[in-house]
Amino acid sequence: MDQNIVIAAYLLVAGLFVYGLKMMAHYRTARRGNFVSAIGMAIAIVFTLLARDDSGVWAVSGKDGWTFVIIAAVIGSGVGLFLAVTVRMTGMPQMVAMFNGFGGLASALVVFSECFKHWGARGDSDPVHMSVAIGISTLIGWVTFWGSLVAFARLQEFLLSGRPTLFKFQKIVNFAALGAVILLIVLWGMFPAAKLLIIPIAVIASALGVMFTIPIGGADMPVIISLLNSYSGLAACATGFVLKNPGLIIAGSLVGSSGIVLTRIMCIGMNRSLVNVLFGGVGAIVVAPGGGAGGDKRVTSWTAEDAAMCLEDSSLVFIVPGYGMAVAQAQHAVKELSDLLEERGVQVKFGIHEVAGRMPGHMNVLLAEAEVPYEKLCDRSETNSELDRADAVIVLGANDVVNPAARHDKGSPIYGMPILDVDKARTVMVMKRTLNPGFAGIDNELFYQDNTAMVFGDGKKTISDIIAVLRQ
C-alpha cells in the first residue's frame, strides 16, 4: 500500500481518537466515544499491517507472517472477551492496572526485538537517535510493567497489603537507579553499536518499577493507576519513534497526555502534589480507632430498623459510596433502596468523590452497572452545596474522603484534602463492618460526632435489611 495512503489513514485515526476522547468526557456520550476510538484503533491496525516502509518492505509478508498475526489476534480477542465477561466490577481496578502493565511490556518487547533483529540490518541513518529512543522506551516500558504488577498485587492484596512498603534510604536508592539508567542511555547514545546495553537498562528499569511503586499505599492507588496509564502511552510513543510509525506516536501521545491530565485531576482532588503522592508514604503509620488526643471515644450504634425510620422521615437523602460498597457488591441493593425511597416521595442523590474507590471513576462505573441514572450522580462540589439541607446521608464504605480532620487537623496526612462535608447533614449513617481506619491509616472523626450513627455489618446485608423493614 502506498505510504501516503497510510499517512492519510493515520490522520483520520488521530481525528477519531481526539473526537472519541472528547465524547468520553461526558457520561451521556462516553460509550459512543469509546466505540469511536475503537474504530480508530481498528483502522490503525489494518493500515499498519498493510503498510510498507521506505525501502518497500511489507510490514507483514509471507504465509508465516500472516499466520502469526491471525493467531495473536485470535488469542488476544479471546482473552479480552473472557475478561470482559468474568471480571467483576470490584476487580476492575486490578484489571486496569494489568492492562497498563501489558501495554508497557508490549512496547518493551517490541523495541527489544527491533534492537537485536532489525536495527542495523536496515541501515538506519541516525543510529544515535535510534539507540536513545530504544533506551527510553525500554526504561518506561519495564517501569510500567513491574510497577503495574505491584499495583495489582496491592489492590488484590496478594503478597502485599494496602499499606506502603518503606525501607531506609529508599528515595536515595530510587534516584540512584534512575540516574544509572539515564547514564546508560546516554552512553548508548554515544556508542550506538553497544546494543547489549539494553539488557542492564531493562534490569535496572524493572527494579525501579518495583521500588517506585511499593512505597505507595492503597489511598493513592487511583493516582498511580492513572500515572501508569500515562507511562504506558509514553512507552508506546517512544516505540513509535523507533518503528517510525506515526500512528503509534499519535496514539501513545494521546494516552500519555490524557493520563497526565487525569493524574493532575486526581492530585487536585486530594490537594497533594504528585511528588507527595510518590514519596509521601501515606498510610504507613496506622492510628488505632479511638486513639489520639481525644482519648476514649464513643459511637452511637443503630440497627437497620433505626436507619429505616430515619430514612422514612427524610425529604432529601444522599448516598456516599466508597470502596466498601464495591467489596460488599452492594450497588444493586443501593439502587433498590433508592427506588423504594423515591416511591415514597424521598429525593435521593449520590455524592461521588473523585478519589473514592481504587481507580478514577470507580464509583461511577459500579453505579452505572446497577443502572443508577447518571443524573443522580453529583460530583463533590454539587454534593457539598446541598449537604447542609440534607436530612440524612448514608456513607457506604467511604472513609478518608468524608473525614472532617482534613479540614482542621494540620498534623493529619490528609489535611487540606477536599472532602465531602457529610457531617453538615442532619443525620449521618455510616455503614461499616468495624471502626478500622481507611487507606490513609488514620482514625475518622466522623464516627464519633453527635449527628453520626454507626450501622455495623456487611454493606449489602445492611442495605437489604433496611429495605426489608421499609417494605413491612
Image (spheres, rainbow, N blue to C red):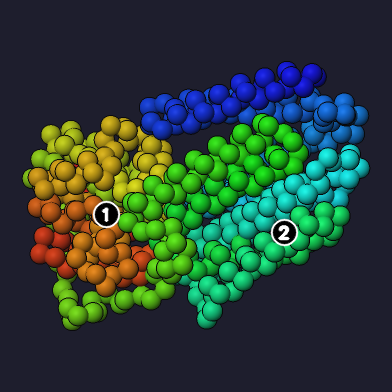
State whether residue 178 appears in this view.
Answer: yes
> What residue is pinned by disc 1?
418
Position in image of residue 289 (x %, y %): 27, 75
First in sequence: mark 2 vs mark 1: 2
- Cα separation, mark 2 vs mark 1, equals 42 Å
Q: Is residue 446 above or below residue 115?
A: below
Q: Which residue is at a point 39% across and 58% down the rendered structure image?
A: 273
Q: Which residue is mark 2?
A: 186
Q: Nearer the viewer, residue 43 or 392?
A: 43
Task: Estimate how packed mark 1 is, as few (under 14), some (14 to 19) or many (20 or more) residues with alpha carbons within 10 Å.
Answer: many
Residue 106 vs residue 172: left or right?
A: right
- Determine which of the numbered discs, if any, sits on residue 167 in the image: none
Q: Mark 2–mark 1 contact, CB under 8 Å?
A: no
Q: Amino acid at mark 1?
A: Pro
Q: Under tag 1, what secondary structure?
A: loop
Element type where label 2 sits in the image: helix
Q: Amino acid at mark 2?
A: Val
Residue 382 is situated, as x and y percent measured from the top left of the image, at 22, 41
The correct choice, above or below, for 257 with respect to 425 in the image is above
Q: Position of residue 471 (x, y in %)?
A: 19, 42
Q: Quadrant of residue 396?
A: bottom left
Residue at far front of view: 190
Q: Which image quadrant: the N terminus?
A: top right
Residue found 72% across the figure and 34% down from its top:
245
Report the residue at 46% width, 67% height from top.
Answer: 279
User: Horizontally, is 259 left or right of 270 in the view?
Assistant: right
Res. 81 in view:
no
43 to 356, vertically: above or below: above
For the C terminus, give its image quadrant. top left
In front of the other: label 2 or label 1? Answer: 2
